[in-house]
Amino acid sequence: MIRFKNLLVENPDTLVYKSNRYNYTRSSARSAFFVYNDIIDTQIYLFGYSDIKKEFFCTNPEVLKQINELTNNDDIKYDSDKDDSSDDGQIDYWAKNAIEILKLGNSGGGHQRLYTILKGIGRIRRGQTYISSARLFEVDDDTDKKMICSFWETKNTVLKYMNFWEDAIKFNGFDPKEILYEPSKFFYTYSQLMDINYDASKQTTVVPVKDSTLQKAIDDKTNEYVDKRGKLHTTGATLTPEEKNSLDLEVFSLDTEIKILTDIKKSGITDYNTPGLQQSVKSVVDRAVAQYEHDKTKRYNLGTETEKQFGGMPMAQIRSLYRGIPLGKLIKKESLYKKLTRHMKLL
């Protein structure tokens, strides 16, 4: 029996390598970092977090000094009377909270938490975006492990800030010349990436396509999945709720289908045209999508009810305050709700 576990994340940073997917919230994501423009001295710096070393790194030592001071400041508490929507509303609290979450986690974390930290110490303004971002993954490569530096941006943008990426890779303990790079879905060795005359339009991935029609189907669907997942990430805010939901269901459907086909391939079947295979897969995928849509609606309703009972407090704040406590317990058990509310006011 095939089991599927859906993990909802804000930012679908998922590396696809040899038909395997590596999500940024898992331990395979070893480090997250980006290049940003500092509003204090207007210089461009590299900032990131390494789960390998459990340390932050930055090309501006003053930033690391500020983070250390914030971490050791025990006077910073959550104040429910403050307005989080204002520019100065508890940004120091949320920055310290992000630091603690990263330190306690088992992955390189998300870029949004790094952004929250810089905003909290006054290095980046609200609404400002970082220039270019990257993440270091540790993936399975046959019998060995391989490091891959993944980017949302194109090769030309990656090359523009290559000195920063090399610094980040070295900080994590790796040789930049010994890993793979993945800007915009294409895989490059270091020498290929640094060859400015290399024609990206003729690039093929480092991973050779297998001859089997089943493997080709997996590769084709993986490419479609990455394209639509990227669209969901980059243009999701401009879509209508109906369009965004439809695209999200397509991404989930493809992700589910790829998992099933990969399991089938591992069982020894290599022909995608095996009688009954495609119809059986479609049947399982349709049921999984229906359940996923049902669960999404249930989670949305539960979240709406929780926000209402907490006086309109945004869900992100509620989950940060009561991490690990199921929403059902927060809104269904009045005694627990009152106890947690009293605790919050004492912080």
Image (cartoon, rainbow, N blue to C red):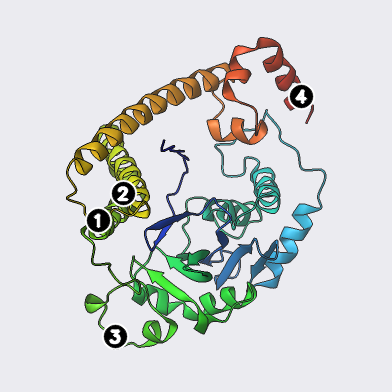
Please say if 300 is above or below 153.
Answer: above
Report the residue that reaches farthest toward the front. 268
Q: Going 22% across and 78% down the picture, which residue do you hit?
A: 202
User: Which one is in front in this view, the residue at disc 3 or the one at disc 4?
Assistant: 3
Whichever of labels 4 and 1 marks the residue nearer the N terminus, that label is 1
Q: Which residue carries the number 3 mark?
A: 198
Q: Which residue carries the number 1 mark?
A: 214
Q: Do we see residue 153 in this rendering?
A: yes
Tell me the CA gap for discs 2 and 1: 7 Å
User: Which one is in front in this view, the residue at disc 1 or the one at disc 3?
Assistant: 1
Asked whether disc 4 touches disc 2, contact meaning CB atoms under 8 Å apart, the reply is: no
Q: Is residue 90 left or right of residue 199?
A: right
Asked whether disc 2 touches disc 1, contact meaning CB atoms under 8 Å apart, the reply is: yes
Q: Which residue carries the number 2 mark?
A: 261
Q: Amino acid at mark 3?
A: Tyr
The number of callouts visible is 4
Question: Which quarter of the figure has residue 46?
Answer: bottom right
Q: Which residue carries the number 4 mark?
A: 343
Tell me the CA gap for discs 2 and 3: 34 Å
Residue 149: x and y in percent read: 48, 69
Q: Going 30% across and 40% down the picture, which residue do you hit?
A: 253
Q: Nearer the viewer, residue 345 or 231?
A: 231
